[in-house]
Image (tube, rainbow, N blue to C red):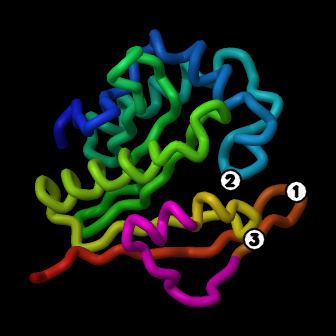
Amino acid sequence: MEKTITTDRLILRALTQQDADQVQTLAGEEQVARLTENIPHPYPDSLAEKWIKDQESLRETNSAFVYAIKLKSSDTLIGTIGLNNATHDGAELGYWLGLPFWGQGYCSEAGQALISHAFEQLPFNQIRARALTKNIKSEQVLLRLGFRSTSEILEKVKEDMDIVRYYVLTRSHS
């Protein structure tokens, strides 16, 4: 998959170690961590560097394709988006944005670009996603991108027993 994808306002590119400080700052916000399954709060020192290194290895084995989301206008990293747990026929979409960048359509724009490229360049038949039920904005992004709830398959996560709902987007065969 391409290492750089551009949209009207964004550049999606492979993460580098130079992104670690900004990843830690943005992902370290309590509100960001609270609405995701896998981001801890407080965000430990050196976790961003390790996570970025892990993403580089996963990209080399075609197991995951995670991108930094950057603004074209200022070259500012605003979050990340990726396809994780890739198999021969699909992957799972995951993303987070820094708090100052919420509510501006960036996640939908990045998601549409990544999904289009994935269906064009990879043999995927479907892309899965999931969101905590309390993360209404993420659910809205998924629905805007064309995902549909798979059913009432719910699972408890995190210490506070948040619930996750699963979604799927199937390649259109038109």
Q: Is residue 41 left or right of residue 101?
A: right
Residue 87, relative to residue 12: is it above or below?
below
Q: Which mark is residue 159?
A: 1
Residue 126 versus residue 45 in the image, above or below: below
Circles 1 and 2, Cβ within 8 Å, touching? The answer is no
* The quadrant where residue 9 appears: top left
Residue 37's disc is 2
* Residue 58, percent from left and from top: 36, 39
Q: Which is nearer the N-term, disc 1 or disc 2?
A: 2
User: What's the distance in space between the residues labelled 1 and 2, CA to CA?
Assistant: 11 Å
Give the residue type at disc 1.
Answer: Glu
The span shown in magenta is: 140-154
CA gap, disc 1 to disc 3?
11 Å
Q: Nearer the viewer, residue 72 or 4?
A: 72
Q: Please tell me how crowded label 2 is: few (under 14), some (14-19), or many (20+) other residues with Cα within 10 Å.
A: some
Near mark 3 (Cα within 10 A), the count class, few <14, some 14-19 or many ≥20, is some
Instruction: Give how far apart the Cα atoms at labels 3 and 2 are.
Output: 10 Å
Query: Does 92 appear above or below 12?
Result: below
Helix, strand or loop at label 1? It is: loop
Task: Tell me the amino acid under the disc marked 3.
Answer: Ile
Q: Is residue 152 above or below residue 163?
A: below
- The N terminus appears in which quarter of the rendering? top left
**Is there a contact, CB below 8 Å, between mark 1 and mark 3?**
no
Residue bearing the label numbered 3: 163
Task: Name the residue at 45% across, 13% down.
Answer: 17
Measuring from the top left, give residue 127's x and y in whole percent: 35, 67
Find out whether residue 110 is within the magenta segment: no
Q: Residue furthest bottom?
A: 151
User: Residue flagged by tag 2: what amino acid is it?
Assistant: Glu
**Quarter-wise, where is residue 87 in the image?**
bottom left
Is 150 magenta? The answer is yes
